[in-house]
Image (tube, rainbow, N blue to C red):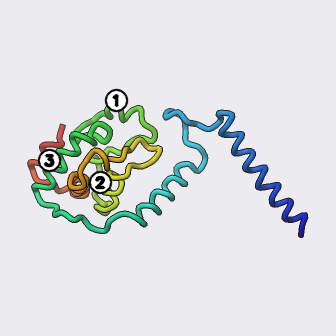
């Protein structure tokens, strides 16, 4: 039994030493143009979904009316479009081209309209580590965070004034 435990401990130490050497000798891909590390996307996605499930609000405290959707479109155009693009925009911005992972073009296809508004709020408020998605908690008011979240949740059915504001 003692030799089994010693073998397990030795095995764990060898694995940890290998991981340390992998990172400390510069083998880990850290450039945005480099391919992801093994299991990087899976582990990051797993952690993100678990954290959002634990902390995201279930409902918006403000209504998704035309006033808030128009205000959300303004916030999106000013703070988000540089990475996530505008409606009708065919090419990525120069900032989006250099990011890894690539920022989703939120106004193409279904975007985030199928995500619960609380999930989008959490992402906008807190950002997402190692993706280039910044936290806007110190840049935008809570009202603005909710407005842009509601805007994105309803991006496929916006009032005309909001639609015009985010069309290139």
Q: Is residue 157 above or below residue 97?
A: below
Mark 2: secondary structure: loop
Quadrant of the frame with the N terminus: bottom right
Q: Which residue is mark 2?
A: 110
Q: Earlier in the sequence, mark 1 or mark 3?
A: 1
Q: Which residue is mark 1?
A: 94
Mark 3: secondary structure: helix
Image quadrant assignment for residue 119: bottom left
Q: Earlier in the sequence, mark 1 or mark 2?
A: 1
Q: Residue at position x 15%, y 50% from top? A: 71
Left or right, residue 26 beside residue 58:
right
Q: Residues within 10 Å of mark 2 (few under 14, many from 20)?
A: few
Any mark on residue 163, and which?
Answer: 3
Mark 1: secondary structure: helix
Left or right, residue 27 beside residue 163:
right
Q: Residue furthest top?
A: 94
């Amino acid at each position: 039994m003692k030799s089994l435990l010693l073998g397990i401990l030795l095995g764990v130490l060898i694995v940890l030493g290998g991981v340390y050497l992998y990172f400390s000798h510069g083998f880990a891909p850290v450039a945005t143009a480099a391919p992801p590390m093994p299991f990087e996307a899976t582990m990051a996605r797993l952690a993100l979904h678990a954290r959002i499930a634990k902390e995201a609000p279930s409902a918006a405290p403000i209504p998704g009316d035309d006033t808030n959707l128009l205000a959300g479109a303004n916030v999106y155009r000013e703070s988000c479009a540089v990475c996530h693009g505008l409606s009708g925009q065919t090419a990525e911005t120069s900032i989006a081209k250099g990011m890894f992972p690539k920022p989703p073009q939120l106004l193409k296809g279904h975007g985030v309209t199928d995500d619960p508004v609380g999930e989008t709020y959490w992402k906008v408020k807190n950002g997402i580590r190692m993706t280039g998605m910044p936290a806007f908690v110190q840049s935008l008011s809570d009202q603005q965070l909710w407005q842009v979240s509601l805007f994105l949740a309803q991006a496929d059915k916006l009032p005309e004034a909001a639609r015009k504001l985010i069309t290139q």
